[in-house]
Image (tube, rainbow, N blue to C red):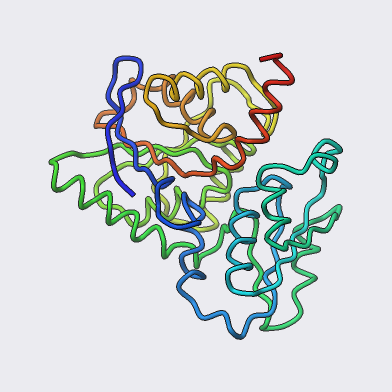
Amino acid sequence: MSIEPIYFRGRRFWVLRDDLIGGEFNGNKARKLAFLLNSNLNHINRIISYGSSQSNAMYSISLLAKMRGVKFIYFTNHICDFLLNNPCGNYAYALKNGMEIRLSDNPSQSAKNECKDSQDIFIPEGVAMSKAELGFKEQAKIIMDFAKKNGIKFDIFLPSGTGCSAAFLAKNLNDMSVWSVPCVGDAKYLKEQISTLDPFNKVKILNPPKKYHFGKLYLEIYEIYKELLDSCGVEFELLYDGVGWLTLMANLDIFKGEILYIHQGGMLGNITLLDRYRRKFDM
């Protein structure tokens, strides 16, 4: 992975390219799952989790389970007809990796109930758990080493779902601000999620320019995705990074230092989203 400059709309931004982490794991899921990637799972029979049917975490856990020969059971509350009839993106790849997916009106509770003994590992949605901190200690070190070497003080920005990445990155950084925006739920929800992981967190939360419903298609999200790709040559993820960049560009005046954007990977989900955008907006 690397930290590199990009120039967008006449301004320089720095980007931590966690999407370029080597191997089959990349992005924030590689960070979140570092504790399992570095663990002996010989005593584990099953990994059990829950979330949406196109979750990046779902795919990453399925890959880990396949690599380690462990059964993966995943609960979700809905799979749309289009996805059932045309498996694609994270959902399709997770199924190929051997994931067993189950429908439930209460996926969180069903996943917890499925865990029987110490041979089962329960992973909450988005891998939002204390053990996930390990990978962000290394991420923080990379940032601090780069900043010290280049004489830069960063304001760090990343979009959030559960807030796990932002919480643990902020916890392990010295003398740098971490900013985020909620992409699932509102600012109150994100603050609560982050405080659960780190009650003394230092994450600063911005509101998006308008309310974006998670998973819904917005033309301005596609447009900034395409503009970034065309002008900077970097592909970002649509669900989170689209809201992230729209929020960042709407709040540039509040940042005092150089801005470092955390590229958290997850572009496999773009396959499905880009197809949906083409069909909805007749592209």
- Residue 282 drawn at (x, y percent): 71, 14
Q: Position of residue 283 (x, y in %)?
A: 66, 15
Question: Which residue sits at x=50%, y=21%?
Answer: 226
Where residue 103 appears, as percent x and y from the top left, is 85, 54
**Which residue is located at x 72 percent, y 48 percent?**
92
In the visual, does 70 lie left or right of 37? right
* Foreground pick, 132 / 177: 132
In the picture, measured across the screen, residue 56 lies left or right of residue 245, that is right
Compared to residue 154, the image places residue 61 above or below, namely below
Q: Nearer the viewer, residue 271 or 10?
A: 271
Residue drawn where x is 45% and y is 48% of the image? 166
Picture layout, residue 239 above or below residue 113: above
Name the side, left or right, on which 216 lies relative to 134: right
Number of labels in the image equals: 0
Q: Position of residue 62 (x, y in %)?
A: 64, 61
When asked about the image quadrant of residue 75, the answer is bottom right
Viewer-closest of 88 and 79: 88
The image quadrant of residue 112 is bottom right
| Residue 199 position (above or below residue 45) | above
Quarter assignment of residue 6: top left
